[in-house]
């Protein structure tokens, strides 16, 4: 069996063995494929787990870093406030009480497209930027600064602030206007002028006139005087008032440039801005002038009669604009005029009337409530009423008691003036005399001065002469040292 059977059955057994090996091989391959698939799934799950762990770790690291990042951002903002605002000028913009003193109502109004295209509210926008800096909102300040320099590209101070804000995003600034060394070396004076301009404008944030107050020089203004202007030379600030049913109200104030050597003009060519009470005498349009004067000018009656009495000389003192290539000039950069940005000057030109609009230019304005001035107003009203009754009475001696022995009107001294008054009194004897549209403005420097303007109308007449008087104190009593007809 062993040999025969083996010999007889060998081919069939070999075939069966081959089939078995083939089946086993197939099963092995399937098992190996299943194992590989399972391994791939396992590897995939492990990879997903590692990725999830990595993401959680990254989030954790980011969370851990957030506090230092926020601290770093605050440090950058702090550097911005300190460098741009306080470092160079020691102006406490971040002080809440100072910010509370600021009143938007007295800034140039913002009026949509006009405020961006014409630069009408450019200063208001710049002050908004400073407020944002003071409150630590550097990013918003940067965005507004970028918009401002785009809308008003000739506003050089805004360009400087924009540059500071850009630099402050990368490093702390020790001072304002930190231009690169080569640029700073080429224009150190101009950078210093821009810093001075910034300081004057920033003062508008914290040195606001108390609400409801007026400069002491405004004593009495009639309803026919629609506007009045006051200039504070020490602050490089011009204030515009509107005269309405409630009296004078501050409606706008603007940065202004004055003389290169400051104020208190004495002689021709001294590059100083005069101090005193003046009136706008005429309006000049830009087409009548060179580009140096910008959009136009308002001329003033310097020297007035008080200036002449003190021997002051000079002429051509105007309120005017700037060349079109500039938005503003540095605080002390004129030959004696008061200079404003063109949009701001234009807003004044469009409002005020020549002849009866007073312009007070003071070294430093003092602000008081109208109630405080009321006793003085009544007293001076009574003074002028005394002059009127004496004039109407025809009593020459009584009338001349109101005039100074130093009286002068052009070429006329007191005796010559008396002769002229006697002729006038003879013509109006027995007729009532009325004073209309009375304006009384006060001034004090070397002495006390009153500038009085009124219309003198005799009974039976519809109109009369417009006169202006200058009164000064002599021995404690008010005396007229000039009187003349101005219209």
Image: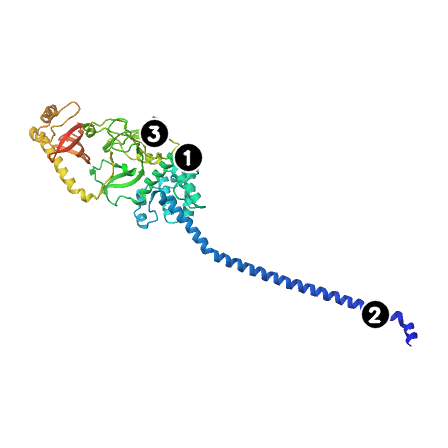
Q: Position of residue 234 (x, y in %)?
A: 27, 38
Q: Is residue 90 left or right of residue 218?
A: right
At x 86% / y 71%, what residue is drawn?
13
- Closer to the camera, 174 or 464? 174
Q: Earlier in the sequence, mark 3 or mark 2?
A: 2
- Closer to the camera, 398 or 100? 100
- State the SS at label 3: helix
Count neighbours of disc 3 (C-alpha within 10 A) and say few if under 14, some if 14 to 19, many if 20 or more: many
Q: Which residue is mark 2?
A: 17
Image quadrant holding the N terminus, namely: bottom right
- State the SS at label 2: helix
The quarter of the picture where residue 192 lies is top left
The quarter of the picture where residue 151 lies is top left
Q: Position of residue 106 (x, y in %)?
A: 30, 42
Q: Which residue is mark 1?
A: 185
Q: Is residue 428 left or right of residue 441?
A: left
Q: Which residue is mark 3?
A: 293
């Amino acid at each position: 069996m062993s040999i025969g059977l083996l010999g007889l059955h060998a081919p069939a057994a070999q075939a069966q063995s081959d089939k078995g090996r083939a089946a086993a091989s197939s099963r092995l391959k399937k098992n190996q494929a299943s194992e590989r698939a399972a391994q791939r799934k396992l590897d995939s799950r492990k990879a997903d787990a590692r990725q999830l762990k990595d993401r959680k770790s990254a989030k954790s690291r980011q969370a851990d870093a957030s506090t230092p990042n926020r601290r770093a951002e605050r440090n950058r903002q702090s550097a911005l406030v300190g460098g741009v605002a306080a470092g160079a000028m020691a102006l406490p913009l971040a002080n809440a009480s100072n910010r509370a003193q600021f009143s938007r109502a007295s800034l140039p109004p913002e009026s949509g497209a006009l405020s961006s295209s014409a630069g009408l509210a450019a200063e208001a926008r710049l002050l908004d930027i400073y407020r944002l800096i003071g409150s630590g909102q550097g990013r918003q300040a940067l965005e507004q600064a970028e918009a401002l320099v785009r809308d008003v590209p000739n506003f050089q101070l805004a360009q400087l602030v924009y540059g500071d804000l850009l630099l402050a995003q990368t490093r702390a600034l020790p001072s304002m206007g930190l231009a690169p060394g080569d640029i700073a070396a080429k224009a150190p004076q101009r950078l210093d002028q821009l810093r001075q301009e910034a300081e004057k404008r920033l003062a508008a944030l914290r040195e606001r006139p108390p609400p409801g107050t007026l400069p002491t020089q405004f004593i009495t203004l009639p309803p026919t005087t629609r506007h009045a202007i006051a200039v504070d030379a020490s602050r490089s600030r011009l204030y515009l008032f509107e005269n309405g049913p409630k009296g004078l109200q501050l409606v706008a104030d603007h940065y202004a440039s004055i003389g290169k050597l400051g104020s208190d003009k004495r002689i021709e060519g001294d590059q100083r801005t005069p101090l005193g009470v003046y009136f706008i005498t005429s309006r000049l349009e830009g087409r009548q002038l060179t580009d140096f004067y910008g959009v136009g000018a308002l001329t003033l009656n310097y020297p007035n009669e008080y200036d002449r009495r003190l021997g002051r000389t000079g002429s051509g003192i105007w309120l005017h604009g700037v060349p079109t290539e500039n938005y503003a000039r540095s605080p002390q950069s004129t030959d004696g005029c008061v200079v404003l940005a063109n949009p701001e000057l234009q807003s004044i030109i469009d409002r005020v009337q020549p002849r009866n609009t007073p312009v007070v230019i003071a070294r430093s304005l003092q602000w008081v409530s109208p109630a405080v001035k009321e006793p003085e107003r009544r007293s001076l009203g009574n003074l002028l009423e005394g002059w009127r009754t004496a004039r109407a009475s025809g009593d020459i001696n009584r009338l001349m008691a109101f005039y100074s022995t130093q009286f002068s009107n052009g070429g006329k001294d007191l005796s010559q003036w008396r002769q002229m008054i006697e002729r006038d009194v003879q013509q109006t004897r027995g007729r009532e005399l009325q004073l209309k549209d009375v304006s009384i403005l006060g001034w004090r420097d070397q002495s006390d001065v009153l500038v009085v303007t009124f219309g003198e109308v005799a009974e039976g007449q519809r109109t009369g002469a417009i006169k202006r008087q200058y009164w000064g104190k002599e021995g404690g009593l008010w005396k007229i040292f000039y009187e003349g007809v101005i219209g």
